[in-house]
Amino acid sequence: MMTNPKVIVKKQLTTSLDYLEQLIEVVEENDLYNYQLNENTRKTAEILLHQLRSAHYYLRGVTKNTWEYLDYTTEKYTTIGEIKDLMNQIRPDLQSMIELLDSDQLHKQFENQGGAFGLNLIIENMYHLSHHFGQLQVYLHANQIQPPEYSFLI
């Protein structure tokens, strides 16, 4: 029997948030807040905040139809501890939005998002998060640090 796509999406979003928390811990343990591969790449902190902003933006948009920019920047969150606190602060809200996801929201078309359906926006965001997970894994390997294990769409 085929698993309901809503169940898969909810499970993967939760897994992604768990992994993001693990990455924040590894960055904190290894003092990599300002690390970047070279001057043309983002700093680790910028990537982490970008992921939080992206997940929050799309979950809030699809579940509450609220599409507003979130000021998750290194100018505002100047330490890894502040990023960790932000994650702890917004994680319950993110998790409740994941639980709120329903078939109507996933099948709703959002004209302000180019006419994309909620499911398409959420899946695109999951791929986007995975892309940045890979980017952070490269950063960790460059520092001889084994990244936590991550599995996509279990």
Image (tube, helix red, strand yellow):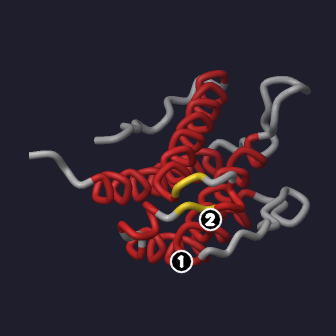
Which residue of the protein is positioned furthest toward the left in this rendering?
1
- Check disc 2 and give the amino acid type: His
N-term mark: 1 or 2? 2
- Up/down of 102 relative to 32, above or below: below
Residue 114, x across and y down, in percent: 69, 51
The foreground one among 74 and 142 is: 74
Report crowding for label 1: few under 14, some 14 to 19, many 20 or more residues within 10 A (C-alpha).
Answer: some
Q: Place residue 4 in its image quadrant.
A: bottom left
Q: Report how far apart the C-alphas of labels 1 and 2 lie in the structure.
A: 9 Å
87 lies left or right of 96: right
Is 6 left or right of 85, judged from the image as shown?
left
Picture coordinates of residue 76 (x, y %)? 87, 66
Total labels: the figure holds 2
Name the residue at 76% across, 70% down: 68
Residue shown at 41% from the left, 38% from the top: 150
Q: Does the residue at mark 1 contact the one at mark 2 (Cβ under 8 Å)?
A: yes
At mark 2, the secondary structure is helix
Q: Amino acid at mark 1?
A: Asp
Seen in the image, is 5 located left or right of residue 98?
A: left
Task: Find disc 1 in the rendering and name its residue.
Answer: 93
Please rate how many residues cluster around mark 2, counting C-alpha atoms within 10 Å: few if below 14, some from 14 to 19, many from 20. Answer: many
Residue 41, position in %: x, y? 82, 29
Q: Which residue is mark 2?
A: 56
- Give me the residue at 79% from left, 59% from top: 79
Instruction: Indicate the position of residue 152 as horizontal and vertical percent values.
Output: 38, 38
The foreground one among 64 and 50 is 64
Quarter placement of the C terminus: top left
